[in-house]
Amino acid sequence: MRILLAAALMATAAPLAAAQPASSPAPVLTTPEAVDIWTHAAPEVARVTHVGLDLDVDFTSKTLGGTATLDIQARPDAKDIVLDVDDLDIASITDAQGKALQWTVGADDPELGSALTVQLDGARQIIIAYRTKPGATALQWLPPEMTAGKKKPYLFSQGQPINNRSWIPTQDSPGIRQTWDATLTVPGDLVAVMSAEKLSGDKGEALADGRRRFRFRMDKPVPPYLIAFAVGDLKFRSLGPRSGVWTEASMLDAAASEFADVEKMIDAASDLYGPYRWGRYDMLVLPPSFPYGGMENPMLTFLTPTIITGDRSNTDVVAHELAHSWSGNLVTNATWSDSWLNEGFTTYFENRIMEALYGKERAAMYADLDWDGMMRDLKTFGGKSGTGARTRLHGDPGATGGQLDYFKGSNFLRMIEKTVGRDRWDAYLRSYFDRHAFQPQTTAGFLSDLRKNLIKGDAKLELSLQLDRWAYAAGLPDNAVHITSETLAVIDRTLAAYKNGGPASAVQTEGWSTQEWLRFLNGIPRNQSAARLAELDRALGLSNSNNAYVRSAWLELAIANRYEPALPSLHEFATRVGRGLLIRPLYAGLMEQGDWGAKIARTLFTEARPTYHPSTAAQIERIIEGSESAG
Ligand code: BES
Ligand code: ZN
């Protein structure tokens, strides 16, 4: 119903777009693929162009309260503007002069939240006074025990895909770009950071009441899922002229050493695909409950501490989030069905950055592991329709076909590179980012750009690429590129000896990178005896491993074999680490083990749930209730 309405509105969109002066925001795309089913907004009628936030952060009530001032561009005949909200307490809405405007909040959709419809009465700026709820899905409020310092509370937001409507009343669609500014007022002993330019220094401004005020500005139009903040006992260390890292004091040395190459990564990325357009590139290392490996918040990538393993073997995650500064933040998926345009492009680009810094073999190691991941995901999800690189799934936009948007999407681009040659491909991709900078993109839009600017009517090339199969069909086209790694081939030989009954003590793990560990552990068949698992754990120290990837892979193996001596390690891990990629497979594995596993999963989740970000808690609840696999 809502989609039909949006389609009807689109028919009238052209005159508005044509009438805009050149300086106005890029028009929202109106092709059928660009219709976003995860927003209530009707941007063709009225759209938000700028968000101004002024919020007070209250750790006692676990709420943010204050105002959102929205600048609006609307058709002359527009009566109202429709915004996305999820469980906000709205006190009042006025125009810029303080005149009250009429508004209604529609029914609450479990996935989308509600439509907030505001009568404009000619207004082109509106001011919403509101407060968030303690359960806001974007926000995780951490008690001091869940931080590294254990003394002060912590708070952070995670907007992607559609969580930001739980703390910002705006049009929460990746195709509706908005500039923004924000003032955050926080307890005097804490520091606020945001995905934007700092206007009030590293320490903010001290207020008479003992609190501190931090001001920020993002003057480039961004999709609203990229508005992000964190508040905690944070310190900063510079790493280069454009880069540095924020984290708690006790983490600062380890973080600075792990990410020492970041400035080189920015150079390599710019050499490949054009200038870095965001000014600074800082990183924030969060507490271990952070739900992702990383999140590409502009100017301030958010990172899980689980990538800090002391050997820099997981800095591909930094390369990945940095690459999003082009694919994702500059050229953005118009809707979450096109997430491969963000994640597949970025996974490809990330690998090119790693190759530029560390050479072909290291890049091959990551690519080879991604191939393994793709094979796993194709088995689980690949038969379903809508599992081309473009995943057309409904319901939760965060639940794509495993990570096929990453794996299949990046392989798609690698196949084009191999077919046309690296020089031609790189020149094309660089021009692509220039042509579409600060705009939304769809799969059809990408394919048509590719045909116009790279293929240029070459029928033989067109035939050999199989573009539409890659983009839209299930399964894997036969021109996929499997890059294999020498380093991992060595691991495969060690693994073969072990699988043949060789002793665990013969497995020499000294100096293994995370990737070598993963190749070994994921390759062990899921039918091990308790004695064999005990021997492995004793020889390799798996239950006590400080590498979270190793712990997670080991626990997956242990769970698949119902190996109970590993349960204390599982408990310690799953109540401390909240990164979805490392804990979802554990819950999913437990649920595959009948009553034995289901009981453990339920007990564990009851205890661990308060330590998880709301979006991760919801995903795990769905795994336990049986409506989702680990993807
Ligand atoms: N943008 C994603 C994180 C994300 C995905 C948030 C989907 C919400 C919904 C981020 O760039 C990412 O891909 N993170 C990965 C790391 C990457 C190296 C594979 C992660 O979280 O593991
Ligand atoms: Zn990503």
Image: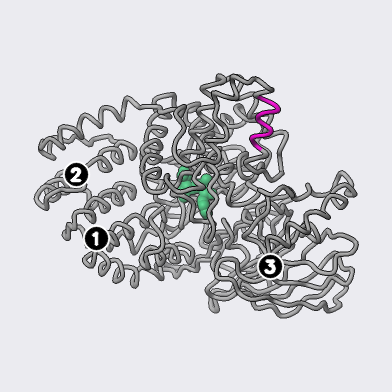
Of circles 3 and 2, which is in front? 3
Q: Locate residue 554, reporting x and y percent.
A: 25, 49
Q: Which residue is mark 3?
A: 169
Whether residue 98 is in magenta: the answer is: no
Q: Give the amino acid type for the residue marked by disc 2 in the picture.
A: Leu
What is the span of residues highlighted in magenta in the rendered image? 446-454
Quarter of image, res 309: top left
Find the distance from the CA under tag 3 to the CA under tag 2: 51 Å
Give the Cα separation between the discs numbered 2 and 1: 25 Å
**Rendered residue at 33%/58% (across/down):** 588
Instruction: Give me the residue at 40% from left, 34% from top.
Output: 366
Q: Give the amino acid at mark 1.
A: Gln
Residue 40 sits above or below residue 174 on the image: below
In the rendered image, the quadrant that contains the N terminus is bottom right
In terms of secondary structure, where does tag 2 sit?
Answer: helix
Which numbered tag is attached to residue 593? 1
Q: Which mark is residue 540?
A: 2
Horizontal relation, residue 490 to residue 109: left or right:
left
N-terminal of the pair, mark 3 or mark 2, is 3
The structure's colour scheme is one colour
